[in-house]
Amino acid sequence: MTLADLQRFAALHPGLATLTVGVLGSCVGSFLNVCIHRMPKGESVITPGSHCACGQPIPFWLNLPLIGWLSLGGKARCCGAKISVRYPLVELITALLFVAAWTMLAGPKVAVAWVFLPLLVLLAGCDLDDMTVPDAPNFTLVGTGIIIAMLVPSLFGETAHAEPAVNRVYALRDSLIGIAVGTALVWWIRTVGSIIAGQEAMGEADIILCAGVGAYCGWQGALFCLFGGSIIGVITALPSLVLSKIKGEAYQGVVPFVPSMAIAGALWFFRGPELLMAWRNWGVS
Ligand SMILES: [Zn+2]
């Protein structure tokens, strides 16, 4: 079976193909759950196999993405402990992202999305779950971004030159500029913000994440990741901010920068040129 056979099959049975992509995405999401749980603790994501918090191993049929959690009603079969809703949520979000990439994007960008987006889900999940973002997936984002830029120069629109190798070099340059801009931007904001606020404004993880989005999306993507992400972060933090104001309490929460920047990075990956166009039109009118 060749790639052309697969494409022909997908064209003949679009519903079945989309369903298969969704199932694939949910399986990736299931693995991301393991990573989100173990990586911040510095544990291996391969061994031991899936086990409950009480130590009992989990058989594979209870470990099926989404179905496993639903059939158990959110409670472990061995000890009755509540299983966090984070598990089916991560599986569902990853499945939907896989399907969105499959239906909205074209060509090799679909495969790139299936690497880029799960890494963003992983980073956001670690931050929400543990408030720590492990370096390994973050640097993986930057590293894979550089490699993919050279493999898929069209990702950066570098297709003009007749010699493919030249396009690869240009795409590599775009990716490296994206990393440099992402790093510099967040580093400056962090430094200035820390001086003004008198405490650390953004973490190192934010710098690497913004660099990673730059590696995949170029400098415009890094810019949107930071500023779009900040807006998304403030909007999500606003309800609890207003609530603490009404109650007359000091605001205890934090702006979830990593998940917000991850959302912004994904938005740019899907609809970057359109977002740029909308921004320009908005400025003109
Ligand atoms: Zn148990």
Image: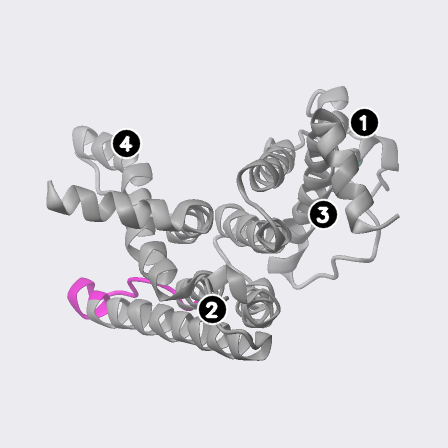
Q: CA distance from mark 3 to mark 4?
A: 32 Å
Give the labeled residue for mark 1: 77
Q: Secondary structure at mark 4?
A: helix
Q: Earlier in the sequence, mark 2 or mark 3?
A: 3
Q: Is residue 73 above or below residue 188?
A: above
Q: Amino acid at mark 2?
A: Ala
Image depth: mark 2 or mark 4 in front = 2
Q: Is mark 1 within 8 Å of ligand 1?
A: yes
Which residue occupies 78% across, 47% down? 4
Which residue is outermost to the left? 285
Q: Secondary structure at mark 3?
A: helix
* Residue 149: image location, x then y, percent: 54, 68
Which residue occupies 46% across, 48% down? 266
Q: Amino acid at mark 1?
A: Arg
Q: Nearer the viewer, residue 19 or 184?
A: 19
Give the labeled residue for mark 4: 239
Q: Is residue 261 above or below residue 136?
A: above
Q: Nearer the viewer, residue 44 or 11?
A: 11
Q: Amino acid at mark 4?
A: Pro
Q: Secondary structure at mark 2?
A: loop
Q: CA distance from mark 2 to mark 3?
A: 39 Å
Q: Earlier in the sequence, mark 2 or mark 4?
A: 2
Q: CA distance from mark 4 to mark 1?
A: 36 Å
Q: Earlier in the sequence, mark 1 or mark 2?
A: 1
Mark identifier at residue 253: none
Give the labeled residue for mark 2: 160
Q: Nearer the viewer, residue 175 or 56?
A: 175
Q: Amino acid at mark 3?
A: Phe
